[in-house]
Image (spheres, grey):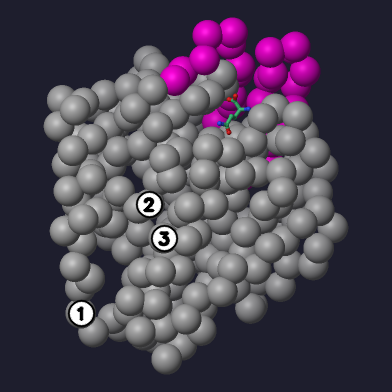
Amino acid sequence: MAVFTIAHLYPDLLNLYGDRGNLLCLQQRMVWHGHDCRIKNIRLGDNLDYSSLDMIFMGGGSDREQGLVYQDLVKRSDSFMVAIEEGMPVLCICGAYQLLGSSYLDLDGHLMEGLKFFDFTTRATKNRLIGNVLIKACLGGQEMTVVGFENHGGRTYFEDNSLQPFGEVLRGYGNNGEDQKEGIKYHHLIGTYLHGPLLPKNPGVADFFLKTMAQRRGIEFGSRLDDDIELTAHEQMKNRLI
Ligand code: GLN
């Protein structure tokens, strides 16, 4: 049995709409695979030892919390990007996703610097993009649909058209309600507007992260999990949307 560790960055600041449920989903699925999975909370100023981690997670947050987190996150940006380039699995939801870009212009006209990992910008507008979302995605060579819930004022635009979205919007808004792009995917990083939490109703996305964590440790899972309940929940939402 192996013990995996997922870092939850800023759990007290970035954790909107039950985003922590993604960690509980990953933890339980890892246990079902016969391994252990610990969640390490990293708060403002805490040391982040990437060599002890198998994955990094950040949830959503309001503009205020994003500003608080940015000041701490920017001090870690070089080492964080090295980890991403080296294939660290990373899941960033909504506000955390927005911070990965060049900038975030909030409703009051304050320009918040982003980590500049990717050349995209986000601009908040009064009318929030709210509702259930259905996208199609391809992870690890496997085509899949993904369902979730979005609630964001920010609209994200790729300035670099070579950037790969997490998926293509079939129902809902996604990054900006205009270009049918949702989120971003880079190596084993996914940034997305999909709350829900995202992973319990999308076992294919959860397994993308679990398999990557295991493979990076030279571990192959023996068998597939029984996802009848998860896929029933997925199909129920998908059928409601199409
Ligand atoms: N504050 C950001 C926005 O409104 C992100 C919100 C969120 O994380 N749900 O766009």
- The residue singled out by tag 2 in the image is 199
Neighbor class of circle 3 (other Cα within 10 Å; few <14, some 14-19, many 20+) is: some
Residue, disc 3: 25
Is residue 55 placed above or below 61 in the rendered structure? Answer: below
Q: Are marks 2 and 3 in contact (CB under 8 Å)?
A: yes
Mark 2 element type: loop
Q: Amino acid at mark 3?
A: Cys
Q: Give the mark nearest the N terminus, 2 or 1.
A: 2
Which residue is more in the foreground, 183 or 151? 151
The residue range painted magenta reads 104-130
| Residue in the picture at 38% in, 52% down | 199
Q: Assign a secondary structure to mark 1.
A: loop
Image region (quadrant) for ligand 1: top right
Residue 223: mark in rendering? 1
Q: Position of residue 51 (x, y in %)?
A: 64, 77
Q: For this rendering, which residue is in front, 196 or 63? A: 196
Left or right: residue 81 versus residue 30 is: right
Which of the two marks, 3 or 1, is nearer to us in this view?
A: 3
- Image height of 128 relative to 74, above or below: above
Give the Cα separation between the discs numbered 2 and 3. Answer: 7 Å
Could you tell me if residue 187 is visible in this image? Answer: yes
Q: Quadrant of the N terminus?
A: bottom left
